[in-house]
């Protein structure tokens, strides 16, 4: 359960305020779109993206050490942050 909560909280805070959430907010502001459809479509998209990430992570872990994957992910986050600041 502790592992579940760690993943849940990490992903929740990583998703808050990102482009995906902002796009979902934009769709939800349109009076012509059903809010239930916006919710279901965005939730299914996030589930599919998460499934793909798990499959990719599982595949990569067979060829790349988890520590190296963490370093690569960290560098990627830093690069996106710098790009966001400079943009």
Image (spheres, grey):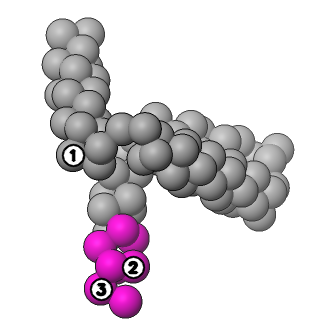
Q: Residues within 10 Å of mark 1 (few under 14, many from 20)?
A: few
Check the picture and name the quadrant holding the C terminus: top left
What is the C-alpha distance between the residues marked 1 and 2? 20 Å
Point 82% across, 44% down: residue: 32
Q: Are marks 1 and 2 in contact (CB under 8 Å)?
A: no
Residue that badge 1 annotates: 67
Residue that badge 3 annotates: 2
User: For the image shown, how many numbered marks are present on the structure?
Assistant: 3
Would you say residue 29 is visible in this rendering?
Answer: no
Q: Give the dominant element type of the magenta stretch: helix, strand or loop.
A: helix
What is the C-alpha distance between the residues marked 3 and 2? 5 Å
Point 59% across, 50% down: residue: 55
Give the image location of residue 5, x and y in percent: 34, 79
The label nearer to you, 1 versus 2, is: 1
Point 37% across, 45% down: residue: 17
Task: Write the start and end of the magenta stretch as one range.
Answer: 1-8
Q: Is residue 62 above or below residue 4?
A: above
Of pointers 3 and 1, the one earlier in the residue sequence: 3
Q: Residue furthest bottom?
A: 1
Check the picture and name the quadrant holding the N terminus: bottom left
Residue that badge 2 annotates: 4
Q: Is 7 inside the magenta-drawn segment?
A: yes
37 to the left or right of 81: right
Point 29% across, 85% down: residue: 2
């Amino acid at each position: 359960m502790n592992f579940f909560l760690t993943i849940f909280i990490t992903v929740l805070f990583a998703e808050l305020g990102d482009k995906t959430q902002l796009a979902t907010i934009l769709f939800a502001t349109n009076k012509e779109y059903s809010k239930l459809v916006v919710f279901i479509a965005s939730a299914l998209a996030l589930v599919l993206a998460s499934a793909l990430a798990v499959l990719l992570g599982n595949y990569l872990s067979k060829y790349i050490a988890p520590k190296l994957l963490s370093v690569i992910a960290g560098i990627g986050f830093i690069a996106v942050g710098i790009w966001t600041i400079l943009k």
